[in-house]
Image: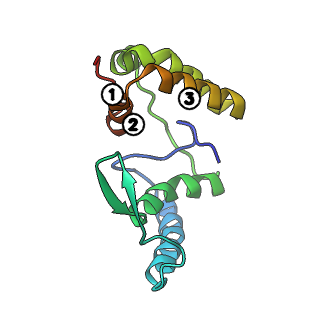
Amino acid sequence: MIDLSSTSVYCNYWVGSPRFWQAYMAFADEFYRLIEEDADNQLGARSFVEHSYVRTYPMIPFIMERLPTLFMRLNPQFKRVVYEYPEELLKKRWGVAYDDIVALKQAKEAQDWQAIKHHTEQLFSKLTPAQLKCLYAFNYLPEK
């Protein structure tokens, strides 16, 4: 599943109707119970993974963080409003990577795996590991 800004749900806060919250919490509770009852870690949710090249974390928060996107895909009757950042802000934050990121977003929207690979390689060839880390972790590209 390739998620786009129009299909992803990532935010520190949400507003929803009681009907939405009842449906979402029932959905999320199923995953929570699966993880809690998996004492032998067969699902791998308690496994630790490196994130942002800084620390390792258990998979549980990453699973729970992605549940809203999955829920919204499975429940199109619930609507969402997507905030799109102004182009000038993105140009400033992403600097020399802006055109490549826009091309990568368009390739994702077209579900074009070859173009995704091409633009990803192009982006990675232009940036230092430190710049890639900042772009990934903070959505910001420092000049050097």
Quadrant housing the C terminus? top left
Name the residue nearer the viewer: 79 or 129.
129
Q: Please tell me how crowded label 3 is: few (under 14), some (14-19), or many (20+) other residues with Cα within 10 Å.
A: some
Q: Identify the disc placed on residue 127.
A: none
Distance from disc 3 to disc 2, alpha carbons, whole Å, reads 13 Å
Task: Identify the coloring.
Answer: rainbow
Q: State the residue at coordinates (41%, 14%).
A: 96
Residue 87 in view in this figure: no
Name the residue nearer the viewer: 79 or 132.
132
Check if mark 1's residue and mark 2's residue have beta carbons within 8 Å.
no
Residue 126, position in %: x, y?
Answer: 46, 19
Q: Is residue 2 above or below residue 93?
A: below
Check if mark 3's residue and mark 1's residue have beta carbons within 8 Å.
no
Q: Is residue 48 above or below residue 123?
A: below
Give the amino acid type for the residue marked by disc 2 in the picture. Tyr
Q: State the residue at coordinates (34%, 21%).
A: 93
Q: Which residue is mark 1?
A: 140
Viewer-nearest of discs 3 and 1 = 3
Q: Which residue is mark 3?
A: 120
Residue 76, position in %: x, y?
Answer: 64, 51
Q: State the residue at coordinates (54%, 66%).
A: 23
Give the amino acid type for the residue marked by disc 1 in the picture. Tyr
Q: Please tell me how crowded label 2 is: few (under 14), some (14-19), or many (20+) other residues with Cα within 10 Å.
A: some
Residue 44, position in %: x, y?
Answer: 50, 71
**Element type at mark 1:** loop
Residue 98 in view in this figure: yes
N-term mark: 3 or 1: 3
The answer to which quarter of the image holds residue 6 is top right
**Element type at mark 3:** helix
Q: Which residue is mark 2?
A: 136
